Image (cartoon, rainbow, N blue to C red):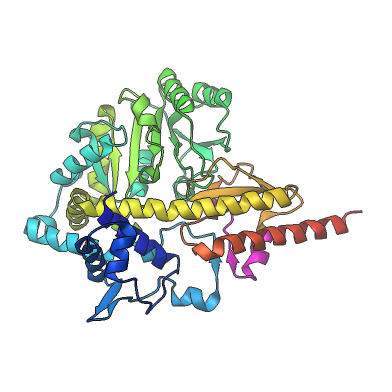
Amino acid sequence: MHKYFLIVKELEEQIVNHNLKEGDKLPSIRVLANQYHVSKSTVIRALHDLEQRHIVYSVDKSGYYLVKSVITANEEEQGMIDFATSSPDPDIFPYLDFQHCVNKAIDTYKQDLFTYGTPQGLPSLLLIMQKQLANYQVFTNVRNLFVVSGIQQALSILTALPFPNGKRRILIEQPSYHLLIEHVMTYGVPVVGIKRTSQGIDFGELEEIFKTEDIKFFYTMPRFHNPLGCSYSAEEKKKIVALAHKYDVYIVEDDYLADMEQDTKADPLYAYDDKTHVIYLKSYSKIIFPGLRIGIAVIPDSLLSAFTQYKRIQDIDSSMLSQGALEIYLKSSMFDRHKQKIKSYYEQRSRLLHAALEQQLIQNGNLFSFDAGVKSSLHTYIRLIEDVPANEVIRRLKKKSLRIETIDKHYLPSFPKDNLLKLNVSRVRLNGIEDGVHILIDEIRQLMAASFSRSP
């Protein structure tokens, strides 16, 4: 990482983690230059970047000061520890960078952004996305790429359109993405569930379902599963693709957190396919901000005509202004810099959460269990004993200003639900993670003690 980016990144982390507070003076240019072993001009460039984004301000002959802290007034008033919210933290959205990209897109494309586009997307953006996808071992032709208005639109289209295999049912991991579950239940899409845990899925059961059920496609999150946080191994991915080919079942791969991957050897399912059975989906909402509503879908040749028709009927095209701004953002160094910041931001919180859970597990191993192998995901979970119902824990914790969301909505209504609590680090304050875990485990201990005291 360039020294300039390192200085910006570490100063931002100090601000986010509240080591620097509103009005605090930053170290002098000379001190920072000595600390990072760089020239004063490099430090000035980094500070100018922060000043341009209204994070710091300069006072003549005095130095640089922090404009604002990242804790919202609402959080400060309530002291809430939030393990429930899964959307990205607004305090790290690239507001000013993206504002620049929007203005640049208008200057560059002018009227082209304010007229109808094509169902496939802005051609120049598709070329950029093709190159970017190659970094994730997704090698495809531009003709197979579609810009979609969020992954939800792609899923909506895929559940509706007829597939070449002539099948009708959708297979979904349980638990899984709650909005897809809500979609199939709302529209009466025939659906089947298969249990997934941190140890993976039962491949015997998967093959039996592929063989005997009328499965159109299998929806899966191989990487950083929501809400479990786990990922499939390379061997598991190869098995899934092989079974899909054997029984002519399509796979819809939701790689929504591809940009968070630390392991450069972790390839998607798409890399093990021959471009015929895996439909690859990638989102930009988690890495940039949800309001962007731009995703990318890689569609096999056999589905191109139908997907184009259904996409055109749904919305003619995705927002051309957003596409133009995203193209400029991806081409610039802004995206890579922001991605590194986000990865570091969430990696730190995820590891703190798992360290706190591991410590509590050592002290209270009879109260819960969790997957200690998942250390770099936004999501994880703990498994409660049956005497401690998850919904009761959630209800009691709310009174103690600790938010945890039920996992029930991640299951099909008819599918057996595990007694799990899901935990998310997207919006929890850094200094609230360890305290939050302590409060959580203490509440579980009290509930279990109360349960035992009522037993005959």
Viewer-proximal residue among 97 and 20? 20
- In the visual, does 367 lie left or right of 188? right
Q: Is residue 181 visible?
A: yes
Residue 248 quadrant? top left
- Residue 451, percent from left and from top: 81, 57
Viewer-proximal residue among 298 and 438? 438
- In the visual, does 121 lie left or right of 166? left
Q: Residue at x 54, y 37 (%)?
A: 193
- In the visual, does 304 lie left or right of 159? left
Residue 166 quadrant? top left
Q: Residue at x 53, y 65 (%)?
A: 431
Task: Name, please, the residue furthest toward the top.
Answer: 246
Start-end of magenta stretch: 392-409
The verdict on residue 393 being magenta is yes
Viewer-proximal residue among 188 and 434? 434
- In the visual, does 420 lie left or right of 92? right
Task: Name, please, the residue furthest toward the right.
Answer: 456
- Residue 342, percent from left and from top: 37, 54
- Residue 339, percent from left and from top: 32, 51
Count of marks, rendered view: 0
The verdict on residue 134 being magenta is no
Viewer-proximal residue among 180 and 341? 341
Q: Is residue 420 visible?
A: no
Q: Residue at x 71, y 54 (%)?
A: 389
